[in-house]
Image: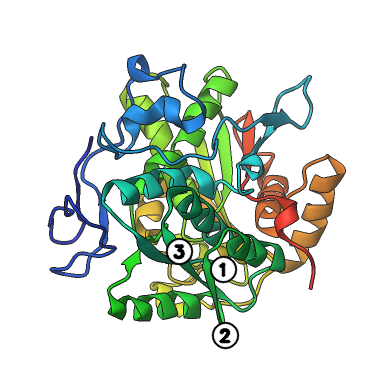
Amino acid sequence: MADIRCMTCGNPYPETNIIHICEKCRGIFDFDSEPFFEDSRVDLKLPGIWKYWHSFSLEPSSPVITLGEGDTPLVWENSAKMEVGFKLESLNPTGSYKDRGTAVLVSQMVFRGVKMSVEDSSGNAGASFAAYCARAGIKARVFVPESASGPKTRQIEEYGAELIRIPGPRSEAARAVLKSLEDGSVYGSHAYLPFGLTGISTIAYELFEQTGGNVGTVIAPTGHGALLLGVIRGFKAMKNAGKCLRLPHFVGVQAENCSPMAMLFNKAITDYADAPEGKTLAEGVRVSRPVRGNAIIKELEESDGEIIAIREEEITPALVELAEMGIYSEPTSALVWSAYKHLEQKLPRPIILIISGNGLKYYPT
């Protein structure tokens, strides 16, 4: 298992508790080595993401908190050509890809003795966090922006978590949860804590198996960026292990109204502070200060990937077109279909579009 250290000062992550930033310099924690994958240690007798247990940041004695996440279908737009596929992460237990990371994160929290934890979210991460905390017997409190969609907030409450609605944009919910830490609460952040990234990397492992090792392009919606970063690291881990010979072309997609990484990547701004946090139907990517944004941009630059922004007026038509193909997604996931249509002529085949969240989580207001 790779060590976790502060990326600024090198301070090692504590062994017995959960902290979201370095207590010495307030830097971000991450794994201190390349992602790990070993084909001979994949346990096909285990279900879902857990067949890849060896690649997780868990001790052998750690409990497993699971709701059956992973093993999601790959559905082809045209099954005869198999050129464009939809990875249906929307069919995870709480309806989004977040469950892969949350399962690993909450297992880590239980191992470290956490009894109560807080989180902030636009909705999907909060619903996933509430569900897995309920499964683990951890008391949860979730901060969401007032604009968070009704189905997601209902999920959070139905799972028994305390729901705190915060006026203003997504960033205000993040500020509120940080302020709440003054009472000593544990911040089970999907954005700050690196544990869940190894769970998200299992998407890459599954795609490799589902395509027979032939993945040309992966397109993913990108807010804080854990989905894209986890998938990139998963493919890198397989390449480092000699399982795949080349990396796919990676495409991150943001909504134009809130597209800090796309703006920075494409040199439209020089600092995230200069990026607007405009309203968008794609609430899952309305993140103006992505915690791991610089790490994601570095990965994209090193792998010759890209990140683009989609205009607001394109989102609803993309949502409708996906539904007409039988793919019921939330608006955030519809970004990938718009991105595909912009870039299809130049992208290596086969092209995989990650449908990150279920359409049942959204209704127009």
Quadrant assignment, res 360: bottom right
Residue closest to the eye, 175 or 17 = 17
Residue closest to the eye, 84 or 344 = 84
CA gap, disc 3 and disc 2: 20 Å
Residue 206 position within the rendered picture, expressed as x and y whole percent measured from the top left: 52, 28
Question: Residue 304: in sight, yes or no?
Answer: no
| Residue plotted at (62% across, 72% down) | 257
Residue that carries the numbered disc 1 in the rendered image? 286
Circle 1: element type: loop
Label pair 3/2, CB-CB below 8 angstroms: no
Does residue 27 appear to the left or right of 252 in the view shown?
A: left
Q: Of tags 2 and 1, which is closer to the observer?
A: 2
Name the kind of residue labelled 1 in the image: Arg
CA gap, disc 1 and disc 3: 23 Å
- In primary-sequence order, the first of circles 1 and 3 is 3
State whether residue 163 is above or below residue 49: below
Name the kind of residue labelled 2 in the image: Pro
| Residue plotted at (33% across, 56% down) | 193
- In primary-sequence order, the first of circles 2 and 1 is 2
| Residue plotted at (60% across, 65% down) | 157
**Mark number displayed over residue 92:** none
Label pair 2/1, CB-CB below 8 angstroms: no
State whether residue 294 is above or below residue 178: above
Q: Of tags 3 and 2, which is closer to the observer?
A: 3
Name the kind of residue labelled 3 in the image: Ala
Residue at far front of view: 137
Circle 2 crowding by C-alpha within 10 Å: few under 14, some 14–19, many from 20? few
Residue 152 position within the rendered picture, expressed as x and y whole percent measured from the top left: 65, 62
Residue that carries the numbered disc 2 in the rendered image? 167
Residue at far top of view: 40
**Mark number displayed over residue 140:** 3
CA gap, disc 2 and disc 1: 15 Å
